[in-house]
């Protein structure tokens, strides 16, 4: 292909895309909070040019469109010099950490790209591969002791993450890009491979003052809660791997009717406990529909999710965490077999736009930027039970700020009522059609339909769940009863998760002590009550209702009727 002809065609396609989308939503707005960002993931080789590779300059030309979309952070997949020995074409097979692969341009081109991203009030995160290098990386021959016999992938050599000299060399290579380009963060690939201690050391060397953003990619079974800064770890965020896996491996995706059962568990996994709800939330990534073969699915998002694509997009973009859009996702780019990251001969056709889906993505990004209820690590998630098992209703709440989403997973139209006692009584506005409604009244959704509601600035009018403990008249007045409400992570990782951490109950009339909380999960929870300093009594509940309990002389818990 003539490269000049390619660039002209690309520019024309992008200009048309900006033109056809800019009238679908209001002007781009800044995030209400620095943490309330939207990430856009790019692999240059398949971004534009099907005959060779997209370039840094191609991405630079596309920045106005991405800013119009509402992107705050660009995550750039590996662009470093790729290996050749035993290689399969993966960008994660790296021969030289400190150079760019010439197919993408030069280091000067990369600096100009980073400068343009910053000039557009966006950030850029580079992708870093700390677990392995290419077979023909100079370190393999110069420092064989820096490697291990462990074989994580057959096209690369796994490093000896315990070796202090290897760690120092790795840290120097990472500092090189911070100093050369002034980047804003790193996404650390396969982070669980080298382990938590490795990253504590590396990140401490590269970024001792914590000026960068650090994202860990990998299985949550390996990247536990203590990897996050909130619990003394080195990372700011981690991939919502289990949530996304639940969606793309769900055998129900293509059934005629999909119930809402289980999706409340997926959301809970993302949102609790609140101070750790920093997962990267996504339905698409290069791992999910690019280059993973039968491990995931060699197909595009419409092939994987079918008619659940829009419902899953609404749920994911409004879920707790940091939303990520993978390149081409916003236009619902579709091609049989997807676009494989290990192939040089495929690229996204930016002129093939699903305008309805693009308008949806832009509106959801706008909500992320303008609704304080969607702040990443503030507020709470409330899943509201309904009288229809095809409908999922969830609320993001932050003080008096509230946003509520209703999703119908059935192919059939449904009329339903929210049965939750904690649903707000305020009047809400549908963001898609401007209509107003009371959430306490019956609502209707089309098959696979959805609605998103926001409220005004008035005070939130909603009841809370009550958990009470009634003590006998002769109870020791010096004892302050406590309660903890928790559940095992319903998606199977993370162990016990607090809905309400250990809390001292408030004294009331007639020896009754209470706590109030906005949410109890419909899939079940455990109430741990204590009426003595050294005694805890457990009771498992499976329905979210307000209750008052008593503790008998034998330690048994009973419900006060």
Image (tube, rainbow, N blue to C red):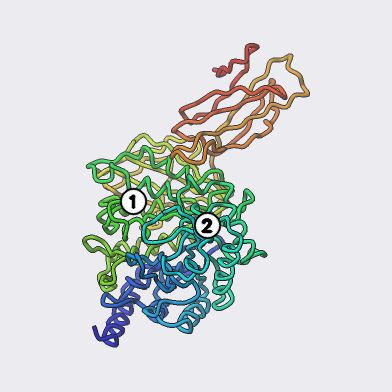
110 vs 38: above or below? below
- Near-viewer residue (496 or 519): 496
| Relative side of 507 to 496, left or right | right
- Near-viewer residue (144 or 193): 144
Q: Residues within 10 Å of mark 1 (few under 14, many from 20)?
A: some
15 vs 158: above or below? below
Please give the residue where the numbered disc 1 appears in the rendered image. Answer: 311
Q: Residue at x 54, y 72 (%)?
A: 183
Residue 407 in view: yes
Q: Residue at x 32, y 54 (%)?
A: 310
Q: Are marks 1 and 2 in contact (CB under 8 Å)?
A: no
Q: Residue furthest top?
A: 554
Q: Quadrant of the N terminus?
A: bottom left
Q: Residue furthest right?
A: 478
- Near-viewer residue (509 or 466): 466
Residue 127 at what x, y percent from top left?
47, 66
Residue 79 at what x, y percent from top left?
42, 72
| Relative side of 30 to 251, left or right | right
Q: How many marks?
A: 2
Identify the element where label 2 is drawn.
loop
| Relative side of 452 to 251, left or right | right
Q: Residues within 10 Å of mark 2 (few under 14, many from 20)?
A: many
Please give the residue where the numbered disc 2 appears in the rendered image. Answer: 160
- Near-viewer residue (433 or 504): 504
State the separation of the CA atoms marked 1 and 2.
Answer: 43 Å
């Amino acid at each position: 292909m003539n490269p000049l002809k390619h660039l002209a065609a690309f520019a024309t396609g992008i200009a048309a895309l900006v033109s056809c989308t800019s009238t679908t939503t209001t002007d781009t707005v800044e995030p209400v909070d620095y943490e309330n960002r939207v990430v856009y993931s790019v692999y240059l080789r398949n971004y534009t040019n099907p005959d060779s590779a997209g370039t840094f300059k191609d991405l630079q030309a596309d920045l106005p469109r991405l800013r119009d979309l509402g992107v705050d952070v660009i995550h750039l997949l590996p662009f470093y010099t790729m290996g050749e020995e035993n290689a399969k074409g993966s960008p994660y097979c790296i021969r030289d950490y400190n150079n760019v692969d010439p197919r993408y341009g030069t280091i000067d081109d990369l600096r100009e790209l980073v400068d343009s991203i910053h000039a557009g009030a966006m950030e850029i995160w580079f992708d870093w591969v700390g677990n392995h290098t290419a077979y023909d990386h100079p370190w393999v021959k110069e420092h064989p002791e820096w490697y291990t016999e462990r074989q994580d992938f057959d096209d690369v050599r796994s490093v000896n993450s315990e070796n202090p000299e290897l760690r120092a060399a790795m840290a120097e290579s990472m500092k090189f890009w911070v100093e050369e380009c002034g980047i804003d963060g790193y996404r650390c690939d396969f982070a669980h491979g080298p382990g938590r201690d490795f990253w504590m050391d590396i990140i401490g060397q590269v970024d001792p003052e914590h000026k960068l953003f650090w994202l860990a990619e990998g299985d949550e079974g390996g990247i536990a809660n203590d990897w996050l800064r909130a619990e003394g770890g080195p990372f700011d965020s981690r991939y919502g791997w289990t949530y996304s896996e639940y969606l793309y491996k769900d055998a129900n995706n293509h059934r005629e009717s999909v119930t809402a059962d289980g999706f409340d568990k997926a959301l809970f996994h993302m949102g609790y406990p609140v101070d750790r709800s920093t997962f990267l939330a996504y339905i698409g990534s290069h791992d999910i529909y690019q280059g993973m073969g039968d491990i995931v699915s060699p197909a595009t998002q419409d092939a994987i999710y079918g008619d659940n694509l829009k419902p899953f997009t609404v749920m994911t973009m409004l879920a707790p965490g940091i939303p990520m859009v993978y390149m081409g996702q916003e236009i619902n780019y579709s091609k049989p077999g997807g676009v494989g990251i290990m192939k040089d001969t495929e690229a996204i056709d930016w002129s093939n736009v699903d305008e309805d889906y693009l308008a949806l993505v832009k509106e959801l990004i706008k909500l992320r930027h303008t609704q304080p209820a969607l702040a990443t690590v503030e507020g709470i998630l409330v899943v509201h039970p309904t009288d229809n098992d095809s409908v999922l209703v969830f609320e993001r709440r932050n003080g008096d700020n509230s946003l509520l989403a209703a999703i119908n997973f059935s192919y059939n139209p449904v009329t339903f009522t929210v049965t939750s006692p904690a649903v707000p009584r305020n009047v809400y506005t549908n963001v898609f059609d401007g209509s107003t409604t009371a959430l306490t009244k019956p609502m209707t959704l089309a098959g696979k339909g959805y609605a998103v509601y926001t409220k005004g600035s008035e005070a939130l009018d909603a009841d809370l769940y009550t958990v009470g403990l009634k003590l006998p008249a002769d109870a020791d007045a010096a004892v302050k009863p406590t309660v903890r409400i928790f559940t095992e992570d319903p998606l199977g990782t993370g162990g016990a998760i607090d809905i309400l951490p250990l809390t001292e109950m408030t004294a009331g009339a007639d020896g009754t002590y209470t706590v109030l909380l906005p949410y109890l999960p419909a899939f079940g929870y455990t109430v741990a009550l204590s009426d003595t300093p050294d005694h805890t009594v457990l009771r498992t509940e499976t329905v979210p209702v307000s209750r008052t309990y008593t503790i008998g002389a034998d330690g048994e818990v009973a419900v006060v009727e």
